[in-house]
Image: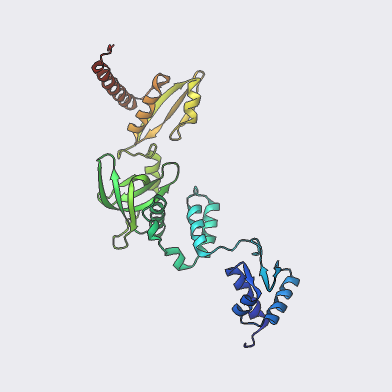
Amino acid sequence: MGRRSGFETIARIFVAFLQQQTWRQTDLARECELSTKALRARLLDLVGAGVPLQREKEHPHVYWSVPHSWFPSGTALAAADVSLVVRLVARLPRSREREKVLGQLLGGLPAAGQHEANRQEEQSKSGVLATLEDCSAQNVAGRIDYFSASRGDQAVRHVSIHRVLYGDDVRFLATCHRDGALKLFRLDRVLTARPDPNEPCRPAVDEKVEEHLRASFAGFHGGGSPVPFSFVVRWPEGRWVLKNLPEAMAVDHLSSSARLSGATAGLDVLARFVVGLGDMAQVETDELRDRVLLLAQGSLRSNAAVRKLNGGAVG
């Protein structure tokens, strides 16, 4: 075996333990291109210097190990594990701390690991989400097979993804390449997804993205301008309502009730929520009241017709 500097030998030993936590002494000597005697001397030097190497005899072999927490001031992760941690951290709400950790993780990830795609996972829900996240992070257009509940059809479309909204029902805000409009899509309606570098990505101004999100209600945007709304819920039922609002609203606490107000482009979804509150809610603005009445009257007609068919009395 050739001669090398002590620094090079120590470096080889450290690299070996980064790759594998436990080594049989003869295998480690072969890996580091040392004699068993020379390796043992270097390992004992490291132990004397404070490296937490653990020696265990199991006749006829000797094993050397490092604990999980041995890496100085941190934890060593494989590139595949770092990719997973990056994806999980990216799903946290945006903050200065989140951006700092993401930057540190991405800085230590090999380029090949950043772009590697797991095609077998793409068809699962987590795989679709991972693909959409990658498209957003890399500014690449996505090709999705999407089911539209409003039209009742399934079709392939291209989207440029600007924001992923995490929660119980994951949604993402994207520019739809069909009509160039900003739209909110539901993750559970994406059947397949893949990046399409041949389709130009369409950027969106941050202010427009934030404006669209603020005007949405419970993940829905009707496409128009935000409409002011206001309704009152009485106590004590109002306390339950305040704890179960699908979106944040301005709340004005009154003596026997609470007034909730704001502006939204998702008035239809808000109206369905208010209808579900029954007689505990009273609407104060005209446009929301009209939609609440329309929904309530439609429900009454539908259920009255069913009751009549079943031979019941209709009031």
Could you say which is closer to the camera, residue 255 or residue 19?
19
Q: Is residue 263 above or below residue 209?
A: above
Q: Position of residue 100 (x, y in %)?
A: 54, 56
Question: Going by the picture, which residue comes out furthest to the front?
Answer: 59
Residue 11 visible in the snapshot: no
Q: Is residue 269 above or below residue 191?
A: above
Residue at image x 52%, y 60%?
Answer: 81
Q: Is residue 261 above or below residue 278?
A: below
Q: Position of residue 99 (x, y in %)?
A: 52, 55
Q: Position of residue 190 (x, y in %)?
A: 33, 48
Could you say which is closer to the camera, residue 101 or residue 28?
28
Q: Is residue 200 left or right of residue 263?
A: left
Which of the image's four quarters has the C terminus? top left
Q: Quadrant of residue 15?
A: bottom right
Residue 138 visible in the snapshot: yes
Q: What colour-coding does the image apply?
A: rainbow
Q: Position of residue 172 (x, y in %)?
A: 38, 47
Could you say which is closer to the camera, residue 132 or residue 13?
13
